[in-house]
């Protein structure tokens, strides 16, 4: 019988990969920041091999760039790539909000409100934690659509979105963001599908413009 090339998963290898991916999603590393294999291995208390394999997997997913002779670094985005990512986000999240307005239950909307409260309750100086909770709000919103295909596509986009969003990690608790989140939730409560879609698009495009402006000023 021909071998299928199966390799039993290694718990340490998988744990290192998932941990580093979560750190990237939370914005703990800045765009373009170098990721040192020896330092990461030391901090995680593992050998360099699972760290190297994790970085290779993350590079395949577009989260990390492997630079010959210089190791790994967090991926950076051009303004054009940011516009593409946020354009797709607006399409997916806007449609999700439209569908959620038609089907979400009152207790599901209350859970969504709890996500917003959690953002405000995050430590004021812990921007990565604020961003993580912000992304969880948007994931919860997309899940409320009940559209599994849409949610799967959104999850695929999250890796790029998290890295792009980390360019501005300190905006989750600002007043403009609170107003926009509140407008989304209010449209959902009113069962206003088009209003919910417009509220999401306004929120997404404002962040897009802020990130693009920061990139073009060379601030990332």
Image (cartoon, rainbow, N blue to C red):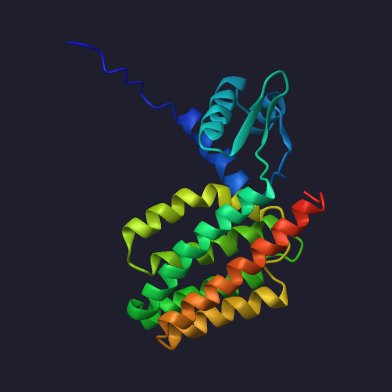
- Residue 69 in sight in this render: yes
Residue 167 appears at what percent x and percent y? Answer: 71, 53
In this orientation, which residue lies closer to the viewer: 178 or 20?
178
Above or below — where is 43 with respect to 24? above
Residue at image position (57%, 46%) is: 22
Residue sitting at the far front? 80
Residue at image position (51%, 80%) is: 185
Residue at image position (62%, 44%) is: 24
Residue sitting at the far top? 1
- Quadrant where the N terminus sits is top left
Residue 94 appears at what percent x and percent y? Answer: 47, 69
On the rendered structure, is 116 left or right of 32?
A: left
Residue 190 appears at what percent x and percent y? Answer: 43, 89
On the rendered structure, is 218 left or right of 201?
A: right
- Residue 168 in sight in this render: no
Above or below — where is 123 with respect to 37? below
Q: Image quarter for residue 150?
A: bottom left
Q: How many marks?
A: 0
Residue 184 appears at what percent x and percent y? Answer: 52, 78
Above or below — where is 173 with respect to 154? below
In this orientation, which residue lies closer to the viewer: 165 or 130?
165
């Amino acid at each position: 019988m021909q071998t299928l090339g199966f390799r039993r998963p290694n718990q340490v290898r998988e744990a290192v990969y998932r941990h580093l991916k979560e750190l990237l999603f939370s914005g703990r590393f800045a765009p373009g920041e170098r990721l040192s294999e020896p330092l990461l291995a030391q901090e995680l208390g593992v050998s360099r091999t699972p760290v190297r394999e994790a970085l290779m997997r993350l590079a395949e997913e577009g989260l990390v760039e492997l630079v010959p002779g210089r190791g790994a670094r967090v991926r950076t985005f051009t303004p054009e790539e940011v516009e593409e990512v946020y354009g797709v986000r607006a399409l997916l999240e806007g449609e999700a909000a439209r569908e959620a307005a038609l089907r979400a239950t009152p207790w599901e909307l209350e859970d969504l409100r709890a996500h917003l409260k959690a953002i405000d309750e995050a430590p004021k100086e812990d921007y990565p934690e604020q961003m993580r909770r912000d992304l969880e709000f948007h994931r919860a919103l997309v899940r409320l659509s009940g559209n599994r295909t849409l949610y799967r596509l959104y999850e695929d986009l999250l890796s790029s979105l998290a890295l792009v969003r980390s360019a501005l990690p300190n905006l989750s608790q600002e007043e403009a963001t609170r107003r926009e989140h509140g407008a989304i939730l209010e449209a959902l409560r009113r069962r206003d599908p088009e209003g919910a879609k417009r509220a999401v698009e306004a929120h997404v495009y404002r962040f897009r413009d802020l990130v693009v402006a920061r990139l073009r000023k060379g601030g990332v």
